[in-house]
Image: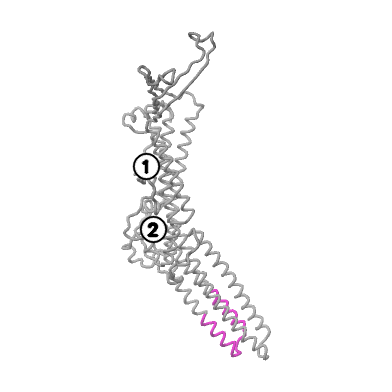
Amino acid sequence: MPRLALIAGATAILAAGCTLQPRYERPAAPVAPAFPAGGVYGTQPGAASATASTPAPEIGWRDFFADARLQRLLELALKNNRDLRVSVLNMEAARAQYQISRAGLFPAVNAVASQSRARTPRNLSTLGKTVSGEYSVGLSASWEIDFFGRIRSLNDQALAQFLSLAESRRAAELALLSSVANQYLTVLSYDDALAVTRGTLVTAEESLRITSLQFDVGAGSELALRQAEGVVEQARANLETESRLRAQSENALVLLVGEPLPDDLPPGLPLNSQALLADIPAGLPSDLLTRRPDIAAAEQSLRAANANIGAARAAFFPRVTLTGSAGTLSPTLGGLFKPGSAAWSFAPQITLPIFQGGQNIAALDLAQVQKRIEIATYEKAIQTAFREVSDGLAARGTFDNQIKALERFTGSQERRLVLSDLRFRNGVDSYLSVLTAQNDLYSAQLLLINARLQRLTNLVDLYQFLGGGWIERAGDTPRPSDTPLGYSANAPGLAAAP
């Protein structure tokens, strides 16, 4: 904007006590007005009653996660996770930075005491005195009158940055709950996979025993014997692989929790007994603007960039600073508080930028570009949230039918193995049919376990994507975004900007 236009506009808004910030307007959401419907989205479990269900932000995480062992792990993670601690400290640093910026709105007052001694050549001194001294005690004050809102804009920027980090910390807390729950479910899935592999190994070892007896009495072939040995060794290798992955998965859980898993954890539920809520209503995409802390953080960053434009515009106008001091002044220390030693000074100053080498113009251009960047970031956050919820809804609408089909498939493979073994024992078929049936059953069992895990982790993620996890129990009063769990700082939390 040309300088003349800025000056003309500032004259009008100065009387109203406003700043040079552009009026903030929330960008329109660049997504469809509703989530996808029909097809895979229309077969969600409990879809008929979903509209009457409780929204995710009103469901406490203890209500969503019924497993007592998982609840204890989540409680420990909220207290001990180091990434969450870092996000809290970043928020506290932003709070302090805001307080520093806010201090610029008030006069700075200091107590000052000084002593000075100087020597002057005799031919330049008065009355032949070559050494002189001066003592002073008093108060000094300095204040920049914020006529054009420069300091106020910087203060608004610092506040918005603080609120953005507060929302980011809130998003980190929700993500931690989701990560701990998903990792816990992953450990349970490895427990199930180990049980299946051990069962497969027992069956394979029994088949190997029978095949060895047949080979020893001449009723079986060496080919069948070697095939049986191969199945046993493969099962043993799978057992070691899954034991390793299970241990590594538990290590990842320990890292998320932030401390070694206690020995007194309550008993947990197996993977197939995890009853997570599946009928949480998705609502409208516009609801995500208030439910999702990552979107709120992106909007606060946009507000900060908008305020920064006001500070960049104010740099084109005069800065008025008032400085003054009052106290006592004396050439000797003993005369500081004698009558007639009072002294004061008052020095107003007006600084008008004339030539800055284009610095102010470039700073304004930079501020406007940064705002456009933040607009794009905010819109991308909304689009990402829309995609995450849509993907979650599509998965929620298909996993139940997939799991039912896999359960029927696993049952058919179990029956197939029984029939193949009978045919082999009666000499009707070769051992290859038994081997194939065992491998197919094992694969079907692992597919079923993986599908159950994916269904549960999708429900956990969808709960997070819809903004759930901020309250502990249904009916609790939500904490302010800048107040972590167990927070007890002396300074009160700052209210969110309107």
Q: Quadrant of the C terminus?
A: top left
Report the residue marked by disc 2: 468
Which element type, helix, strand or loop, lies under badge 1?
loop
Q: Amino acid at mark 1?
A: Glu
Amino acid type for the residue under numbered disc 2:
Gly
- Mark 2 → mark 1, Cα distance in angstroms: 27 Å
Instruction: Give the image location of residue 382, x and y in percent.
Output: 42, 51
Disc assigned to residue 40: none
- The answer to whether residue 169 is above or below residue 179 is above
Q: How is the image coloured?
A: one colour
Residue 352 in magenta stretch: no
Depth order, front residue of 255/478: 255
337 relative to 440, above or below: above
Q: Is 33 on the left-hand or right-hand side of 454?
A: left
The N terminus lies in quadrant = top left
Badge 2: residue crowd in 10 Å (few <14, some 14–19, many ≥20) = many
Residue 59 on image: x %, y %: 35, 60
Closer to us: 352 or 27: 352
Query: Is disc 2 in contact with disc 1, using a CB cutoff of under 8 Å?
Result: no
Q: Earlier in the sequence, mark 2 or mark 1?
A: 1
Q: Which mark is residue 25?
A: 1
Magenta-tinted stretch = 414-443
Helix, strand, or loop for circle 2?
loop
Residue 51: image location, x then y, percent? 32, 62
Numbered disc total: 2
